[in-house]
Image (cartoon, rainbow, N blue to C red):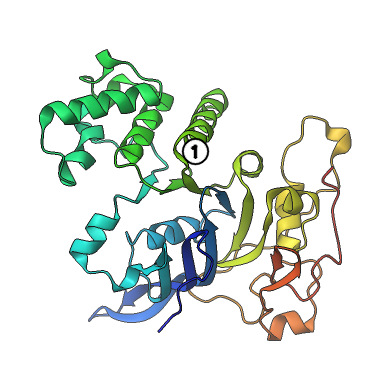
Amino acid sequence: MPDPPENPEILLEAQHIVKHFPVRGGVFMKQVGAVRAVDDVSLAIHKGETVGLVGESGCGKTTFGRVILRLEEPTAGALFFEGENLLAFGRGRMRRMRREMQIIFQDPFSSLNPRKTVAQIVGEPLLIHGLRSRREREARVLELLETVGLRREQMRRYPHQFSGGQRQRIGVARALALNPKLIVCDEAVSALDVSIQAQVINLLEDLQERFGLTYLFISHDLGVVEHVSDRVAVMYLGQIVELAASETLYRRPLHPYTQALLSAVPMPDPTLKGERIILRGDVPSPINPPPGCRFHTRCLFAKEVCRKRVPSFRETADGHWVACFFAGVVGIRTD
């Protein structure tokens, strides 16, 4: 039986989460393998903080975000929310718990029902969770729309009548409807123009300060993550390879993969840019990940031990965790 977190400041803790998707083939469609989307990931999120989760496309970020909300059931591991084991909840109790945990989806164009008005979209969580009075729902919807910067007269409009940034604000309002404690922002600004991204990010920060929200901010945009996050976790091929406070990670990355990612971030002044690190090869298949350190096939500094042994996820300094035998041996300029 897994142990719940002892620290009362931890809102959600994922312990050794595994999520494999079966691969089927043959005449009888038997399982012939598995996509190891998330493979032994542990992460604690404290109340009121923003944790950034970054990595290349396909590394398992979105799957992990969906698993901690139980939109996907984990293959193995444990999940605790305010000390309660989420995986022990039945369907009814989990449905009630969803008031506390919400998600803002990546695509504001496909995540809103085109057949419903804004009032129906934002009010649907209220209806599902028992606020039956139409008058009360409309009053709450109006309050939410004003909170995210939309107007009363827009309540009766449909999603196609809004811009991308406005649609994402509708998604934010829907996520806020039930006063959640945790919101998973799954690439919440990646589909938006840069100027609109800034507006939505500022909105999320204002709402966090106003309502005491906790965010898991999933993104591949390292510049945005640096701006919004208190801590940042770097994910590669289904595993977290580095975790540290945002300022620490961007100033002194220890894992070669993190160093390579940061070397690719555009900077306003090119003269301050360090040497670009070009990774060799492609990301291995999550169906058949390499033995030892999963990054060794692309790492410029891999040794024989990296090919044979799995590096432990260890704390090298106060709150700075890394899974690498030679962490920090080679650095890059980030200032």
Q: Is residue 13 left or right of residue 294?
A: left
Q: Amino acid at mark 1?
A: Gln
* Whole-percent x, y for residue 118 in the image: 24, 27
Q: Quadrant of the N terminus?
A: bottom left
Q: Position of residue 224 (x, y in %)?
A: 61, 39
Q: Position of residue 182 (x, y in %)?
A: 42, 50
Image position, residue 19 (x, y; %):
42, 71
Query: Could you tell me which quadrant the C terminus lies in?
Result: top right
Circle 1 Cα neighbour tier, 10 Å, few/some/many (<14 / 14–19 / ≥20): some
Residue 163: quarter of image: top left
Q: Which residue is mark 1?
A: 208
Residue situated in front as seen by the camera: 6 or 315: 6
**Secondary-structure class at tag 1:** helix
Residue lying at 35% horizontally and 74% vertically, measured from the top left: 22
Front-lying residue, 37 or 202: 202
Q: Is residue 161 above or below residue 231?
A: above
Vertical comparison of 126 with 317: above or below: above
Q: Nearer the viewer, residue 136 or 36?
A: 136
Is 78 on the left-hand or right-hand side of 277? left
Q: What residue is at 44 percent from the left and 38 percent from the top?
A: 211
| Residue at x 76% of width, y 62% of height | 256
Q: Is residue 147 left or right of residue 248?
A: left
- Asked if residue 238 can be seen in this view, the reply is no
